[in-house]
Image: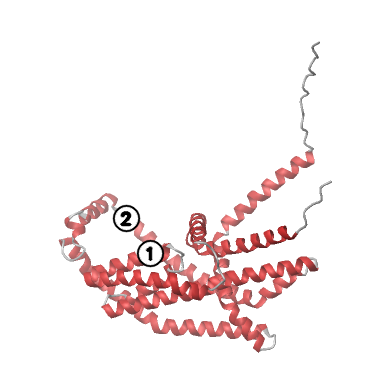
Amino acid sequence: MLQSVPAERERVVQFQPRTILLVIGILVASFITLKVLWISRHVLSWVFIALFLALALNPAVDRLEHRFRGRRGAATGVVSIATLIALGLIGWLFIPTLVDQVDNFAHKVPDYLDDLTKGRGRLGFLETKYHLVDKARKALREGGASKLFGLSGTALAVAKGVVNAVLATVTIAFMTFFMLLEGPGWIDRFLSLLRPDTRRRYRSVGHDIYRTVGGYVSGNLLISLIAGGLTAIVLAILGVPYAIALGLIVAILDLIPLAGATIAAIIVGAVAFLHSVPAGIIVVVFFIVYQQVENHILQPVVYGRTVQLSPLVVLISVLIGAELAGVLGALAAIPVAGTLQVIFADWLRHRRAQPAPETG
């Protein structure tokens, strides 16, 4: 006997107006938040740089605070003044040389252009082989007056860039000072909102994050200074022009993990080869040897046990950070990855410590 199969009932899902409004409100709030973050991205980059510097200077402030018997304001003031004096001395020692080298380069530009136009010198191949000068003259004739207006617009952009750089420097200096002064108070006020058991856990996680990020920041700055200083010394010994300026470029680029040192080696090596072939070969050999020393000696000694990330994780983090936020994203990639690793390790440790649910 055949049994009739009951017809399947259609399931109707009903949403309450309150739920719909809540979802719409969340979407609108998310859009507004992302829009505000995009508009204020320059300010956020200043905040990141200030946080970077505060993490590098905070160990010195903590030591002085202990010596000053808890007077953090005095410790912060002493460290800030000492940092400004150190930067002033560095500027007094290097900026005149840097300005002189840039000035000499500016005076030699006409000679370089004359050699380039006539196909002579080390850059003459650009004219003889690629006819670069003819192409530039053709572009200038076709551009006409618009090129002149473009130059004036470039000059205005450079002037605005200088003003923004000065404003950013002053703002970052004040933000760094206040982060050093008030940072522990902010953390204590946040932890006071938590339960005692949760407070102990998050205080431990915060200490591990600070040790990881602070150790990386301090170590990265120190290694970059070593790279820039050694490069300037080698270039000065070889007689390569603009040694101080090129050393500064190396120090800045070396802050970028993995790719920064390679880019710096290409730039400095090209300048050295323009000076002389033996100097170029020596500079390339120097960068190869120094990279081995930095990777196998300096980084393990300076970083110690603060940042324990595999090279693959570092590479992926840097690529994602660079794609999201350019140079700043690449700089922040390893600290963010280290922070996520600390949080994940704490979550996994507490998950394993929880008793398994009883099954009846």
Report the residue that reaches farthest toward the top: 1
Mark 2 vs mark 1: which is more N-terminal? Answer: 2
Identity of the residue drawn at 57% across and 71% down: 306
- Above or below residue 92? Residue 292 is above
Q: Is residue 281 visible?
A: yes
Tell whether 275 sits left or right of 219.
Answer: left
The quarter of the displayed image where residue 295 is located: bottom left
Separation of residues labelled 2 and 1 (CA atoms)? 35 Å
| In this rendering, the label closer to the viewer, 2 or 1 | 1
- The residue that disc 2 covers is 147
Q: What's the amino acid at mark 1?
A: Thr
| Rendering coords of residue 57 (x, y %) | 57, 78
Tell whether 55 sits left or right of 278.
Answer: right
* Viewer-closest of 134 and 59: 59
Q: Secondary structure at mark 1?
A: helix
Question: Within 10 Å of the Cα at label 1, are there few (<14), some (14-19), or many (20+) other Cα atoms?
Answer: some
Q: Secondary structure at mark 2?
A: helix
Q: What's the amino acid at mark 2?
A: Lys
Identify the disc placed on residue 254.
none
- The residue that disc 1 covers is 262
The quarter of the displayed image where residue 100 is located: bottom left
* Viewer-closest of 143 and 335: 335
Q: Is residue 244 visible?
A: no
| Rendering coords of residue 46 (x, y %) | 55, 67
| Rendering coords of residue 63 (x, y %) | 62, 84
- Above or below residue 130? Residue 262 is below
Question: Within 10 Å of the Cα at label 2, are there few (<14), some (14-19), or many (20+) other Cα atoms?
Answer: some
Tell whether 270 sits left or right of 291.
Answer: left
